[in-house]
Amino acid sequence: MEAVAKLNNYPTSPRKMRLLADLIRGMEVDKALGVLQFNPKHPAVPLFKLLKSAINNWEQKNTDAKVEDADLIVKTIMVDGGRVIRRMRPAPQGRGYRIRKRSNHVTLIVDSKTEKTVKATKEKVVAKAEAPVAPVATPEVKKPRTRTKKDSATSKTTN
């Protein structure tokens, strides 16, 4: 069973956050925590906390299972743009340049790898066993057409 954790309006640009999200997408949870813990980029700290929150949410849903035995993976991580705060900066000749302070929303879904792989492999095996084998049709081989005197006479008159 999957667990979700969300981080809304974190004040960094979505592009910077997506670099880290792409790094941990599909990883095992322990490995992803290690990558985020030692990553020098500043959005690594909130992503680390968000991942720990998702793990705790998974524990709350699955009280009978242990995290160590579940082989948790980062199933989905999405980074969307949040609100943009606009400021003005003085510019030459009385103008003003607009500064956009971006923020983002992160949604992280953690799921157990063992349950999914077992179910998926069982479904694939059953689907392959039940699938009927269709007979293979052999294509007819056409003989190459040879030109006759009649064909060559008509082709000369049409040109």
Image: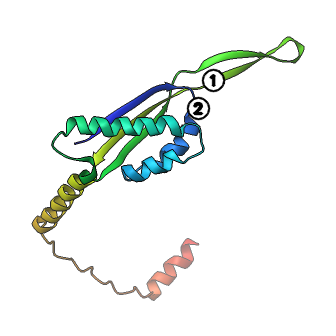
* Quarter where residue 76 is shown: top left
In the rendered image, the quadrant that contains the C terminus is bottom right
Q: Amino acid at mark 1?
A: Lys
**Residue 115 image position (x, y, % from top left):** 20, 52
**Residue 59 image position (x, y, % from top left):** 25, 39
Q: Which mark is residue 13?
A: 2
For label 1, count other residues whose C-alpha is less than 10 Å away and answer few (under 14), some (14-19) or many (20+). few
Q: Amino acid at mark 2?
A: Ser
Q: Which mark is residue 69?
A: none
**Residue 102 image position (x, y, % from top left):** 59, 26
Considering only order in the chain, which callout, 1 or 2, is on the residue closer to the N terminus?
2
- Closest to the observer: 142 or 51? 51
* Residue at which label 1 appears: 101
* Quarter where residue 88 is shown: top right
- Closest to the observer: 56 or 118? 56
Secondary structure at badge 2 equals loop
Q: Residue at x 82, y 14 (%)?
A: 95
- From what the image shows, is residue 82 above or below residue 45? above
Q: Residue at x 48, y 43 (%)?
A: 21
**Residue 36 image position (x, y, % from top left):** 49, 45
* Quarter where residue 13 is shown: top right
- Closest to the observer: 157 or 15? 15
